[in-house]
Image (cartoon, grey):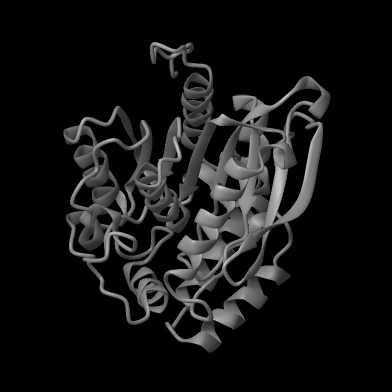
């Protein structure tokens, strides 16, 4: 069973998010309150050879990134995963996903580049997408800076970060930047907010519908809600995208739109592994110390990434997912 401090911190985070009113002042207060919470207990992760803070050139200035490498640079270039944190486009940072990035780097034997993209409402759409793309393009253009193999690049993200990962994966297809995989964990894929899961799980389960609606509006600004760069489910053509792993939580407002995106990719001929975790709620992937299903989802994600990175030239995966 998880320890009482872990459970208490999770409850405090839920209570803070419930106070979000949808205006800039409430966002800033929530950010300050989150910083005052004690850091979470973390399971021991394997030691990494390198963890370093860098910046990448972005359209509005330097974008903070954190590089994780499980092996020293003398071992040669590694496959690379660009990771995009969640937080409803208005919260979150590199520190929030430090644990999962360490975990995926060690388990998938890859460099991980975690992106500190700009947040709304100060920086509405498409600021986050532009920053995410700038970092992915930088890793592809200057792989030696990251010790990366540009022929083995992938993107990943959860929640809002899953949205950004899906959007830049499509942009990579359109700009002939080959990716070997996209890992989308309970991603935001639409702006309609009208699915059965939005109606059924809209309160008290970690991501309230009213809170997410406010966050989406702040991020959207004046953009067309049907823009596929904002709502990837609205894209007309999903063919030719990188193979995908889509992970959803049963009791999550984002469940249905994430699964709809997985189905549309599959219908377009994209190899997709869709896995729904019964009885789980939003954020379970980031909290394996509380939710056993989170530990399994992490193992699945790492295995799928490792298989994509080590696939042979005929496209066959070298390792099965658990």
Q: Is residue 177 above or below residue 193?
A: above
Which residue is at 30% across, 57% downward?
253
Relative height, residue 193 to residue 46 (above, below): below
Is 76 situated left or right of 163 in this image?
right
From the top left corner, tell me how far across and down residue 217 is, in percent: 35, 77
Q: Residue at x 38, y 38 (%)?
A: 247
Q: Is residue 22 above or below residue 315?
A: below
Where is 19 relative to 234, above or below? below
Say which residue appears at 48% left-offset and 12% top-offset: 319
* Residue 222 image point, x, y percent: 33, 82
Which quarter of the rendering shows the C terminus? Answer: top left
Q: Is residue 26 left or right of residue 209?
A: right
Between 289 and 29, the residue placed more toward the observer is: 29
What is the quadrant of residue 206 in the picture?
A: bottom left
In the rendered structure, the answer to whether residue 78 lies left or right of residue 318 reads right
Q: Nearer the viewer, residue 106 or 78?
A: 78
> Residue 266: which quarter of the image?
top left
Confirm whether residue 151 shows in the render. Answer: yes
Residue 187 on image: x %, y %? 37, 51
| Left or right for 164, reference 239 | right
Q: Quadrant of the N terminus?
A: top right
**How many circles with numbers are drawn on the protein?**
0
């Amino acid at each position: 069973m998880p320890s009482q401090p872990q459970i208490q911190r999770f409850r405090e985070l839920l209570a803070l998010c419930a106070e979000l009113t949808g205006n800039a002042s409430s966002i800033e207060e929530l950010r300050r309150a989150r910083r005052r919470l004690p850091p979470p207990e973390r399971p021991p992760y394997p030691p990494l050879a390198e963890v370093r803070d860098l910046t990448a050139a972005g359209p509005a200035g330097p974008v903070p990134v954190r590089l994780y490498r499980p092996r020293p640079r003398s071992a040669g270039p590694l496959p690379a995963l660009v990771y995009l944190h969640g937080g409803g486009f208005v919260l979150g940072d590199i520190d929030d996903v430090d644990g999962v990035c360490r975990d995926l780097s060690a388990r998938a034997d890859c460099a991980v580049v975690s992106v500190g993209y700009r947040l709304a409402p100060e920086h509405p759409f498409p600021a986050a997408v532009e920053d995410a793309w700038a970092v992915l393009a930088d890793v592809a253009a200057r792989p030696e800076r990251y010790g990366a193999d540009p022929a083995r690049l992938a993107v990943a993200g959860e929640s809002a970060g899953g949205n950004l990962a899906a959007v830049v994966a499509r942009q990579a297809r359109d700009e002939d930047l080959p990716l070997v995989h996209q890992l989308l964990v309970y991603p935001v894929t639409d702006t309609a907010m009208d699915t059965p899961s939005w109606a059924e799980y809209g309160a008290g389960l970690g991501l309230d519908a009213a809170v997410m609606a406010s966050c989406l509006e702040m991020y959207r600004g004046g953009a067309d809600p049907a823009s596929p760069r904002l709502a990837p489910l609205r894209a007309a053509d999903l063919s030719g995208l990188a193979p995908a792993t889509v992970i959803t939580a049963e009791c999550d407002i984002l469940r249905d739109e994430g699964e709809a995106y997985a189905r549309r990719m599959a219908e377009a001929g994209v190899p997709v592994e869709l896995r729904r975790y019964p009885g789980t709620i939003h954020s379970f992937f980031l909290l394996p110390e509380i939710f056993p299903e989170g530990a399994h989802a992490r193992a699945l994600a790492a295995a799928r990434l490792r298989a994509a990175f080590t696939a042979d030239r005929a496209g066959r995966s070298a390792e099965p997912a658990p």
